[in-house]
Image: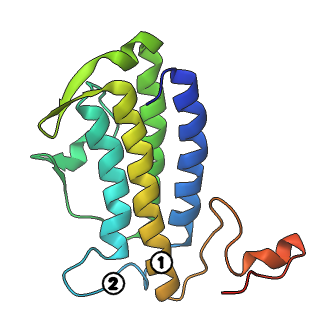
Amino acid sequence: MFRTLDDFRTCWIEESKATLRVLEVLTGHALGHAVAEGHRDLRRMAWHLVESVVEMPGHMGLGIEGKHLIEGGFIVAPPESAAEIREAYATASASLLRGLEAWSDGGLLVEDELYGERWKRGFTLQVLVLHQAHHRGQMTVLMRQAGLKVPEVYGPTKEGWAAYGMAEPKV
């Protein structure tokens, strides 16, 4: 759980940069790739990241840019373009940081109802970060399957070790 807004901001800035690196790699031909029929494809998963940055903070009273994308608690259909998804994510992410400017650290202890439970706002922000990382990880697997180059997030990718002058780890 985040206890200071500065800790969240520092974390969010880095995490949103990592998400944008993943979204930057998406291409039109790969957006339809899913692990199996009936599962989220890359387009829907990327759009879910936008949805989360709008929807979760909305439960805490923050009006994030992109709120018009939410209907009945769910986001409208994703756009066809990877660029539109990236732009919507960048806009919502920046809007989240601006919205938090009105809060104090004590506000992180306020409880809101989310999904039938009472969550402290500091916990909700932690869940938002972890939820994003979870889906970003799912996306990188789908991206590799779709033939896209996976960007580094928390360290080198399989192909990235060479840039550090090191051999890739044996599997």
**What type is the residue that disc 2 sits on?**
Val
Residue at 36%, 52% (x, y): give it.
50
Residue 141 circle label: 1
Crowd band around label 2 with a 10 angstrom C-alpha radius: few (<14), some (14–19), many (20+): some
- Residue 134 in percent (x, y) is at 42, 59
Q: Quadrant of residue 59?
A: top left
Residue 133 circle label: none
18 to 157, vertically: above or below:
above
* Left-right relation of 38 to 121: left
Residue at 61%, 80% (x, y): give it.
149
Residue carrying label 2: 35
- Residue 168 in percent (x, y) is at 76, 81
Q: Quadrant of residue 114?
A: top left
* Left-right relation of 66 to 132: left
Residue at 90%, 75% (x, y): give it.
165
Q: Mark 1 falls on what kind of element? A: helix
**What type is the residue that disc 1 sits on?**
Val
Q: Mark 2 falls on what kind of element? A: loop
Q: Looking at the rendering, in which quadrant would you find the C terminus?
A: bottom right
150 to 85, vertically: above or below:
below
**Are circles 2 and 1 on residues that touch, CB within 8 Å?**
yes
Residue 24 visible in the displayed image:
yes
Give the farthest residue toward the right.
Answer: 165
